[in-house]
Image (cartoon, rainbow, N blue to C red):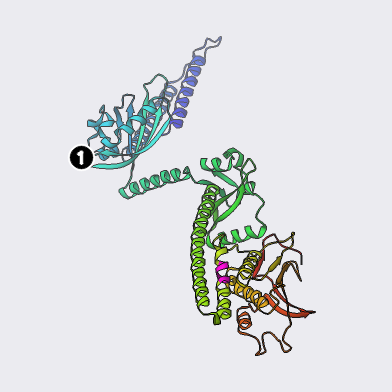
Amino acid sequence: MSEKNIKHYQKRLQALRDAAEASLSLNTAPSHKLAPPKSKEELLHELQVNQIELEMQNEEMRQAHVALEESRDRYMDMYDFAPIGHVNLTQDGLISAINLTGADMLGVARENLLKRPFSRFVSSKDSDRWYLVFRGLIRQELKQSLDLALMHADGSLFNVRLDCLRLEVKGEPLTFQVAMIPISERRHIERRHVESELRIAATVFESQVGMFITDAKEVILRVNRAFTDITGYTAEEVVGQTPRLLSSGRHDAAFYAVMWESISRNGAWHGEIWNHRKSGEEYPEWLTITAVTDNHGLVTNYVATLTDSTKYKQREQQRLAEESAHRDALVREVHHRIKNNLQGVTGILRNFAALHPELADPITTAVSQVQSIAVFYGLQGRVAQTKVRLCELISAIATNNEALWQTPITVDIPLQWVPSRVAEAEAVPLALVLNELISNAVKHGDRTKGVSITLRHEPLPYMVQVTITNSGQLPPDFDFPHLPTTGAGLQLVASLLPRKSATLSWKQQDGNVIVRLELAPPIITLEQGEMET
């Protein structure tokens, strides 16, 4: 019988007593006219009614008592044979009550557990943790939970989860209810593994790499301390915002379209991106974005990691500059040695020509060709490998031929001149071509009048026109490079002259022979920006 029913029954009995007293009071009240006395049969009938009423009340009370006992037994059965252990502890940590399941878990009879310290059954490796938890309960903490190992009476250990509750009843001693929930070994290992992973994840999240997490709509949910250190934005300033807050504006829509297409297809993207700090400073960062999906493959979050690439780029630029300087020094040294060796060859040829005057002209021509190559390597020995200028190459070859043939050679370069670099692959062939044209002008012209060379940006601003003028006459049947009258020197020019980006022509004007060599990219490259065509 429930407590509600018991209260209802008690109220009913009280009502019966009140009614009986009221009836007796009315029957015994004084009256001016006395009622006639009842007969024996009426009195007997009334006594029988009262007897039956008392018997009914006694039966109801007996049934209520039986119901209370059954309810108590059911509660005790549910308490004692619950699938988990229940323990009540005093403020001193002593067991004041325990169910049969809990006693069975500890391997000790229930009557032998009462007033024993619960801490005696906690494994030594978890005793400190239990002490701290229990002290926390005593210090007003309402609930506490923890996993630990308890010791069975046979000395074996088993894992449980303890859910502890502080109970305070006014006027009664402080007590604590503890539920002991068994944990299987596998579940215990899994739980410890999950806890370990969570600790690792928490440690990683607070690493030196900036991190932020968004929801599926790219709204920032969380950032770590390194993110704040890199960007200058605190968590309060960015949570609820999107990563577009960091955009520098350097990247167009196509860049982000490729990024998100990669994330959609591969689940991740990584690359360099320019963002800006809270201060407005733009900086490069290496960004990795990974999509997090649920069991159905739907994206739930995005996790992004970022590192500031500024110092890395500075170190990389410094490393490349040092490597370039070291390489240029080695290249200059190699070219310098080649030039010296070629000059040694020309010295040998000159000595041979002095011993054999009849071979002076062909040997001088050979010396001129060798020296034109030596001029190129000499220039390479002074500057970086890719910075040989056409004007310097022509001036050096002209100076070399002037000394070799003892003929004046002038080089006219305008004051407003835009230097042009010679492509590395074409540098040696072009040096030989220029040397052959200049030396040919000297040999077939009036050596007393000399040779003039002009450089102009013609016929287009990005081109260079080299004009070599000497006194003399072209042969009547001259047709470079097809006629057999073309000499061996010009045949060399024809074979070395690039088929594209270079044209060569001859013109007879009055008493002068004019040779024009027109060069265009990629044989040459202007150093001062792009010029209008």
Where residue 136 sits, quadrant-wise, is: top left
Say which residue label 1 marks. Answer: 155
Residue found at x 50% / y 66%:
340
Residue 1: within the magenta?
no
Q: Nearer the viewer, residue 413 or 210?
A: 413
Q: Quadrant of residue 107?
A: top left
Principal secondary structure, stretch drawn in magenta:
helix
Q: Position of residue 26 (x, y in %)?
A: 52, 15
Q: Please tell me which residue lies in front, 335 or 214.
A: 335
501 or 472, which is in the foreground?
472
Place of residue 303 in the rendered image (x, y in percent of width and height, measured from the top left): 53, 51
Query: Which segment did they paint magenta?
Result: 371-376
Bin the neighbour count of mark 1 within 10 Å (Cα to Cα): few under 14, some 14-19, many 20 and up: few
Residue 255, how many percent across, how many down? 63, 59
The image position of residue 311, as x and y in percent, is: 53, 47
| Residue found farthest to the right | 510
Does dot 1 land on a helix, a strand or a loop? loop
Q: Amino acid at mark 1?
A: Gly
Q: Residue 374, can we see it? A: yes
177 left or right of 455?
A: left
| Quadrant occupied by the C terminus | bottom right
141 or 60: which is nearer to us?
141
Locate the N terminus and report the quarter of the image it occupies. top left
Q: Residue at x 72, y 89 (%)?
A: 477
